[in-house]
Amino acid sequence: MEAGQYERDTPPRALVFGGSGQIGERLLAGLLAQGWQVSAVSRVPRAPAPGLVWRQGDLSGHWRDDGPFDAVFSCGPLDHFARWYQASDIAAPRVVAFGSTSVEVKGDSSEPAERDVAHRLRQAEATLFAAAHARGVAATVLRPTLVYGAGRDATLTAIARLARRAGLFVLPAGADGLRQPVHVQDLADAALQVLRHPATAGRAYALGGGERLGYAEMVRRVLASLQPPPRLLRVPAPLFRGALAAAHGIGRLRGMNTAALARMREPLVFDIAPAQRDFGYAPRPFNPTRDMFGL
């Protein structure tokens, strides 16, 4: 569903939520490059651009736009979008929404908050697919894994910035579980690619990066992208847990809980073959540069 495929006098129209986010800003650029007319929803006023109009509002519905649209994209929280879509009367034959592989990873977490995240994602996917099916709309959910590339993610960018300040980064021994970091541009490209492939309707796809590598190797590559490269220090797991408890005690590293620590040892990789088969997904290998972490 590219701009050139529309045999009509007006260009295709897209409605985008989360357009100011790390994936959304790349998606907006891709849509505009293909000749779409885009309406993007933002809580704060933003300057328009050729082909792009910002509507001030949020998913509680406090905004208006003249429909219909050819596609609706959601690059923000899936649960909020699913509730909005279910209650809306928006007219669009195609919906593409980003979720997360956390729906598969955190369902059995030892942390109640993480189990709640997985439950909300699962419910949101079910709500979105049911509402779309009832309207005869083709909906697709994309589940990214470890996102990087815009300097706005909460994992790899956080590692890069902490390591640069300290001159080193500490990992527990055994933190070698496989990972698939995925670049934001590959995710934005995927959202556009699915539009051209009917087989993606009613399906959810895991979107990992083009390479599987151990957690420690992933961190080594992050550190190697910095100048000067910080040192990677690996310590016995009990010592790391003690340091983590001390950090929590002074209000640091709140996102690093015991469940996250345990996952460093686990292989968290996902099958991207369905995405490759159904819409030609072709993510890049993990070769980070410092600008990808906003440094």
Image: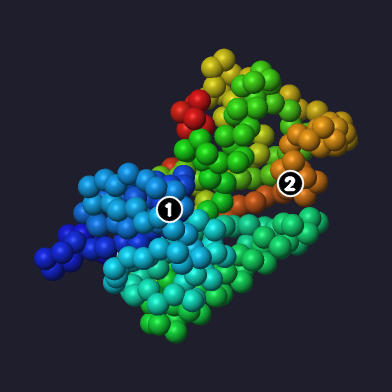
Q: Is residue 62 left or right of residue 223?
A: left
Marking on residue 187: none
Marking on residue 42: 1
Q: What element carries label 1?
A: strand
In this rendering, is residue 294 above or below 79? above
In this rendering, is residue 166 above or below 48? above
Q: Residue furthest top?
A: 228
Q: Is residue 204 left or right of residue 92?
A: right
In this rendering, is residue 196 above or below 156? below
Q: What residue is drawn where x is 60% and y is 52%?
A: 269
Q: What residue is drawn where x is 61% and y is 69%?
A: 122
Q: Is residue 29 left or right of residue 156?
A: left
Marking on residue 260: 2
Q: What residue type is labelled 1?
A: Ser
Q: Which amino acid does label 2 sit on?
A: Ala
Q: What residue is drawn where x is 46% and y is 52%?
A: 43
